Amino acid sequence: MCIIHPFWSLLVSGLSDGFLYALIALGYTLVYGVLQLINFAHSEVFMSGGFAGYFILNRTIGSHTPHGLDSVLMVVLGTVGGAVFGGLVAFGLERAAYRPLRRRNAPRIAFLISAIGASYFLYNLAGKEFGRDAVSIKAPFNLDGNAFRLFGAQVQTYQVVVAVAAIVMLVGLDRMVAVTRLGKGIRAVAQDADTASLMGVNIDRVISQTFVIGGLLGGAAGFLFGLNYGVVYTMGFTPGLKAFTAAVLGGIGNIRGAVVGGLVLGLVENFGSACIQTSWRDVIAFGILVAVLIIRPTGLLGERLGRSA
């Protein structure tokens, strides 16, 4: 029988991890929604955001220690910098690895191979240019500091920063997709690309903008992840696969499903590893992926598939 003593501590850490998974998972689910293809290079978009935040903050902070409002500004600067660079990398991926194949009506396997090739290119390029060893982002605040207590559990400042940043971005994305012209275009292309084109929607522009939006979220997540765990050229692999698991768990192509899947995965990982052993953490995560694909391939919330662009 599993008895979990630090329930609230595990809940807090699970939600913190889950918010990061959700931000990355949205990049997968947005692209799948419009193309019905998986962007396997998205983990390198995540990695690029981490390196962007590293260079920006380490140059900006220098030798001084930020405090108060200065710390907040540094977090915003790093998050925005990581997001912008992630968006740029995602934009380049769409132009180089996807658009030429779409214009040639290439088979789906060609998209998969192209994405994997782009992923390995970025992976090795980062290793060559930035080195093979992990580096640390200069902390804009005390990462181990405690913000407050929740039913006896210490909630770290880092976990609060991750939660606040993620909630702001997730709510912003949900509202953007629901009410803006771009959001309506994304939903139209996801539902039926051919009809959307006949109605005057610029398919290429919507797809490119969708990649950029996913890249913005993935790059921001890369910075937030790198703050606590450091930055290295291999950093995107495991979080990327877990975020893909979260997207499948919630219902690939469903934006709110990606958020739900990320939070559920983070919680199950933390509580599961507490019940068994920490070394089983990744086994639990990928076991969930296999189980979902076997038992409920549409995920928790599911998604009706339209005709891809």
Image (tube, rainbow, N blue to C red):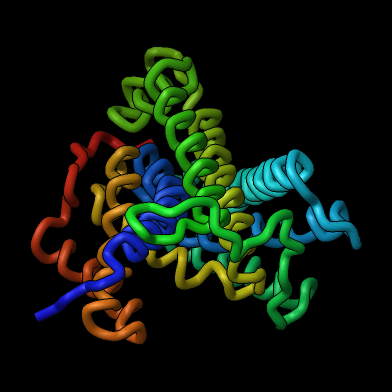
Q: What is the x, y in percent for residue 290?
A: 20, 70
Of residues 152 and 78, the one drawn nearer to the viewer in this rendering: 152
Q: Which image quadrant is residue 232 in?
A: bottom right
Q: What is the x, y in percent for residue 170?
A: 44, 37
On screen, residue 176 versus residue 72, left or right, reads left
Residue at 54%, 67% (x, y): give it: 236
Image quadrant occupied by the N terminus:
bottom left
Whether residue 294 is visible to the viewer of this picture, yes or no, is yes
On screen, residue 296 versus residue 149, left or right, reads left
Residue at 71%, 82% (x, y): give it: 132
Q: What is the x, y in percent for residue 186?
A: 41, 28
Of residues 211 and 292, the one drawn nearer to the viewer in this rendering: 292
Q: List the single residue furthest toward the right.
A: 63
Q: Which image quadrant is residue 193 in?
A: top left
Of residues 78 and 116, the one drawn nearer to the viewer in this rendering: 78
Residue at 24%, 34% (x, y): give it: 306
Residue at 69%, 78% (x, y): give it: 134
Whether residue 243 is visible to the viewer of this picture, yes or no, is no
Q: What is the x, y in percent for residue 95?
A: 61, 45
Of residues 10 and 90, the one drawn nearer to the viewer in this rendering: 10
